[in-house]
Amino acid sequence: MESKTGSIGSHVKHWQISLAIIAALSASLALSEDFKTIEGKEYKNATVSRVEADGIVVKTKSGITKIYFTELPKDVQERFRYGSARPTGKAVTQRIDKAESTTHATPFVSAADRFASFVEKKLDERESILQGKHTPGPAELMARQEMNFHWGFLAGTAIIATVLFAIVWRRFK
């Protein structure tokens, strides 16, 4: 009998842990509000998806955008603890208490957030490439070196062929 009771207690603990994890995941959902940058750009009905060290990532009808803290008014910076010694992470989303009580996270929302983050990262990388701010990695450097070698080889072959053609042309002339 005691082993069954101990087993039930163990299952209850696992269930409580699972419930705590689900509650923590639902904290990533937040209610929307409006943001206005120092320069006057407005983000209507924006939902903060995450807080990073240098800004907040918001979702709007038009897409996902990162707003840097330097672009936000001081009161918004303070609300998200910009400049604090310890990063705040997802724990500091807007109105978490209300969001936890009214909505629950689903695996689909979590997967959608991860995909949106992945797409945002790729778009940022492409934008930095277009602006000339991209720092190539080792694989990209190796590929560039190989392409440069092939271009050099083709250029050298073309020069040698031209010189040989000129020599042969003079001999038959």
Image (cartoon, rainbow, N blue to C red):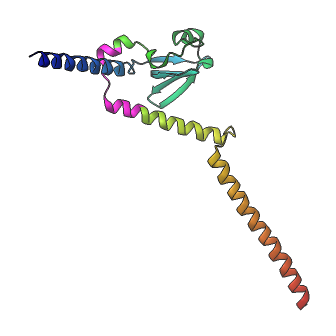
**Secondary structure of the magenta portion, mostly?**
helix
Q: Quadrant of residue 25?
A: top left
Quadrant for the N terminus, please: top left
Magenta segment: 99-113
Q: From the viewer's side, name the closer residue of 161 and 33.
A: 161
Count of marks overlaid on the render: 0
Q: From the viewer's side, name the closer residue of 149 and 127.
A: 149
Q: Position of residue 43 (x, y in %)?
A: 50, 22
Q: Residue at x 82, y 74 (%)?
A: 160
Horizontally, residue 81 falls left or right of residue 115, namely right
Q: Residue at x 67, y 48 (%)?
A: 141
| Residue at the limit of the structure toward the bottom, as seen here | 172
Q: Position of residue 173 (x, y in %)?
A: 91, 90
Q: Position of residue 170 (x, y in %)?
A: 91, 86
| Residue at the limit of the structure toward the front, as seen here | 2
Q: Work out whether 18 lies above or below 173.
A: above
Q: Position of residue 151 (x, y in %)?
A: 73, 62
| Residue at the limit of the structure toward the left, as seen here | 1
Horizontally, residue 88 falls left or right of residue 83, namely left
Q: From the viewer's side, name the closer residue of 63 and 20.
A: 20
Q: Work out whether 133 lies above or below 47.
A: below
Q: Quadrant of residue 135?
A: top right
Residue 45 belongs to magenta span: no
Horizontally, residue 22 falls left or right of residue 54, namely left
Q: Residue at x 21, y 18 (%)?
A: 10
